[in-house]
């Protein structure tokens, strides 16, 4: 599902309600006070209902006759939705979610790298080389560094030529961007290019084992980078 734009009153209303639910300020099972929300956000009833439809589509709220609009159990929420992930990071780095993201990446990306080594085309390699070039040029520019890293990991998934794996970018992209902002937004950090280039070199050689190993080493480095960033924040 495409990410929902947070711009404008409508988008801001969606995000504000979602964040309250995701942080537990509005608990699962609670019935929403529609009149109070309408007054607080100063929106029409139609606009508020449209906002709630967005959350309903993500499994977060539902409506029933006699009960009204209520928060569904967390087990029903679409936690793999890009917006739901982004909303959980809205208050700052979410350490549990970052750890879970790494676990997902550790399961998916090494296997994706192995498959990409078997299936990648010259165009796939060219796209990854371009991402490496952008990564090198992004030194000192956190925004550009995040964009380059996302391009690389999207390119890797695309190189598998497996449509379901390609869709995993929706799961990982927002969380990966938050992880990158944490790492690249602080003090000096290790050059990310060599670890990423090792993956591309293995793909270019069509070496499946080397590609999987290089990706595991890249992910291990990613964990160390996050721990360093956490240490910097804890000492401030």
Image (cartoon, helix red, strand yellow):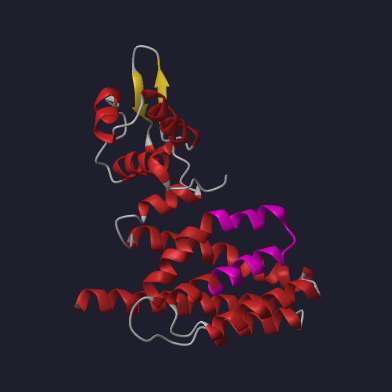
Q: Residue furthest left?
A: 236
Please tell me in which quadrant of the rendered image residue 45 appears: top left
- x, y percentage for residue 152? 60, 72
Image-based side of 213 in relation to 21, left or right: right
Q: Residue furthest top?
A: 66
Total labels drawn? 0
Which image quarter is the N terminus in?
top right
- x, y percentage for residue 74? 38, 38
| Placement of 70 over or under 95, stated as above or below | above
Question: Residue 208 magenta-drawn?
Answer: no
- x, y percentage for residue 82? 49, 51
**Residue at horizontal 29%, vertical 56%?**
91
Query: Magenta region's main secondary structure?
Result: helix
Question: Residue 155 magenta-drawn?
Answer: yes
Q: Is residue 102 visible?
A: no
Which image quarter is the C terminus in?
bottom left
Image-based side of 92 in relation to 183, left or right: left
First to last magenta residue range: 148-170
**Residue at horizontal 56%, vertical 47%?**
2
| Placement of 200 over or under 10, stated as above or below | below
């Amino acid at each position: 599902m495409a990410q929902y734009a947070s711009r404008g009153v409508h988008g801001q209303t969606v995000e504000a309600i979602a964040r309250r639910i995701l942080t537990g300020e509005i608990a699962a099972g609670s019935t929403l006070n529609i009149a109070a929300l309408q007054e607080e956000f100063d929106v029409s009833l139609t606009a508020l209902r449209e906002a709630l439809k967005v959350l309903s589509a993500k499994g977060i709220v539902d409506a029933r006759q006699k009960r009204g609009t209520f928060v569904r159990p967390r087990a029903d929420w679409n936690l793999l939705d890009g917006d739901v992930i982004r909303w959980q990071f809205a208050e700052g780095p979410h350490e549990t979610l970052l750890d879970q993201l790494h676990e997902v990446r550790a399961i998916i990306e090494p296997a994706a790298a192995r498959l990409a080594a078997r299936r990648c085309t010259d165009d796939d390699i060219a796209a990854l080389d371009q991402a490496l070039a952008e990564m090198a040029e992004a030194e000192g520019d956190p925004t550009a560094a995040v964009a380059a890293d996302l391009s690389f990991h999207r390119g890797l998934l695309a190189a598998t030529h497996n449509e379901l794996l390609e869709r995993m970018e929706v799961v990982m992209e927002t969380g990966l961007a938050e992880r990158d902002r944490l790492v690249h937004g602080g003090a000096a950090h290790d050059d990310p290019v060599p670890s990423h280039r090792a993956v591309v070199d293995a793909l270019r050689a069509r070496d499946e084992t080397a590609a999987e190993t290089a990706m595991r080493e890249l992910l291990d480095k990613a964990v160390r980078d996050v721990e360093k960033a956490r240490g910097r924040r804890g000492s401030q």
